[in-house]
Amino acid sequence: MPAAQNTAQNAAHSPRVTIGVSLKMYFGHHETLNWARSIASLAARHPAVTGGTAELFVLPAFPALVPVTGILAGTEVRTGAQDLATDDSGPYTGEVSGAHLHEIGARYAEVGHAERRRLFGEGDTVVAAKTAAALRNGLTPVLCVGELDQVAPAEAAARTVAEAERVLATASHEGPLGPVVLAYEPQWAIGAPRPASPDHIRTVCESLTGWLSTQPALAGSRVIYGGSAGPGLLTQLGTGVDGLFLGRFAHDPAAVGRILDETLEGALACPTA
Ligand SMILES: O=C(CO)COP(=O)(O)O
C-alpha cells in the first residue's frame, strides 16, 4: 500500500494519540467515582476526544470498574483493569478473570507492570499468560515493558524490545496475538519526580515501533510512554510516541485536560501502523 494511502487510513481509523490512566491504589471508592465524573464531563466536551484526535482509557481498582464504566458510558472513554487472572474460571481465590472483566464492560487489561513484577513476584511467564488471557477474552493488553536501571537510551531500547519480544513470543504459544498497547515504562522513572528525558523516551519508543512494524500479528498496536508523565511531556516528545500512560499526574482532572489540549497542538504524529 502506498505510504500516503496508509497514512490516510491510519488517520481515518485510529486516533492519533492514546492516553491511558491507571489509578493504581491511590483513591478510595467515592474519590474514584468523583474523579470519573470529572473525566466524563471533560471527555464529553473536549474536542480532542469528541473529534477523535485522542483516545482515552482509564484503569480503576476492580470494585470501581462497573460504576466507572457506567459513568463513562456515552463518552468515548473506555475502561479496563489493572490486572487479570491467567485462567478464565476455576479455583483461583482472589483472582478476576478476563471473561468476567469483558462481561462487565472492560476493554483493556494491564499486564506486566513493574509494581506487580517487584511486589508480587510476577515474571515473564505469568505476564505472557496474562497477555494471552486478555487477548482471548477480547481485552486489549496494556503490556508494560521497560528497563530496571537507568542505562543509555540505545541499551534501554535493546533491553525493552527484547522484553516485548520474549513476552509476546511466549503469549503467542497460547493463542493468536492481536493489537496491544505497549506501555514503555522505564522502572526507574515510575513514581519519580520527573519522567525520562525526551531523547531517551523517543529512542526506546521508536525502537519498539520499528520492531512492531515487523510483526504482522501485532498490527494496530500502539506505543505509549509512562513513568512520571504529565502535562508538557507530549509537546516535548513531538513525534515518535503514540501517547502517554499516566499515573499520579492524572489525579487532577485539569491536568488530563491540559494533556488533551496538547494533542490538538499539531506537532504530534502517529508513527505506528
Ligand atoms: O506506573 C505508571 C503508570 O502505570 C506511572 O506512574 P507515575 O506517573 O505515578 O510515576
Image (tube, helix red, strand yellow):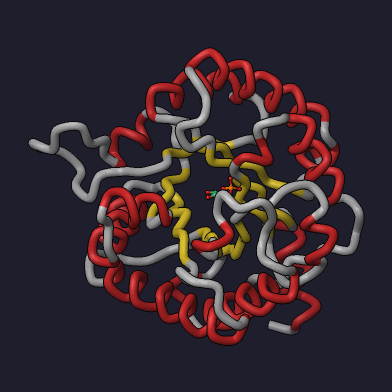
- Compared with 51, 218 (above or below) is below
Residue found at x 60% / y 56%: 226
**Residue 47, x across and y down, in percent:** 85, 38
In this view, the residue in front, 189 or 162, is: 189
Q: In the visual, does 269 lie left or right of 67? A: right
Q: Is residue 67 above or below residue 174?
A: above
Position above or below: 145 against 70: below
Q: Nearer the viewer, residue 222 or 123?
A: 123
Q: Measuring 46% from the left and 65% from the top, which residue is drawn there?
A: 145
Tell whether 237 sits left or right of 174. Answer: right
Task: Residue 9 in the image: state x and y as whole percent.
Answer: 72, 66
Q: Residue at x 79, y 43 (%)?
A: 260
Tally of marks: 0
Identify whether 146 is placed above or below 234.
Answer: below
Answer with the quarter of the image where residue 189 lies: bottom right
Image location (x, y in percent) of residue 71 = 59, 19
Looking at the rendered image, the quarter that the C terminus falls into is bottom right
Q: Quadrant of residue 129?
A: bottom left
Question: Which of the image's four quarters has the N terminus?
Answer: bottom right
For this orientation, the residue located farthest to the top is 30
Q: Residue at x 55, y 21 (%)?
A: 32
Q: Point out residue 131 in the picture as x, y percentages from the top left corner.
A: 34, 58
Residue 232 as seen in the image, left or right of residue 164: right
List the single residue furthest toward the left: 91
Q: Is residue 202 left or right of residue 182?
A: right
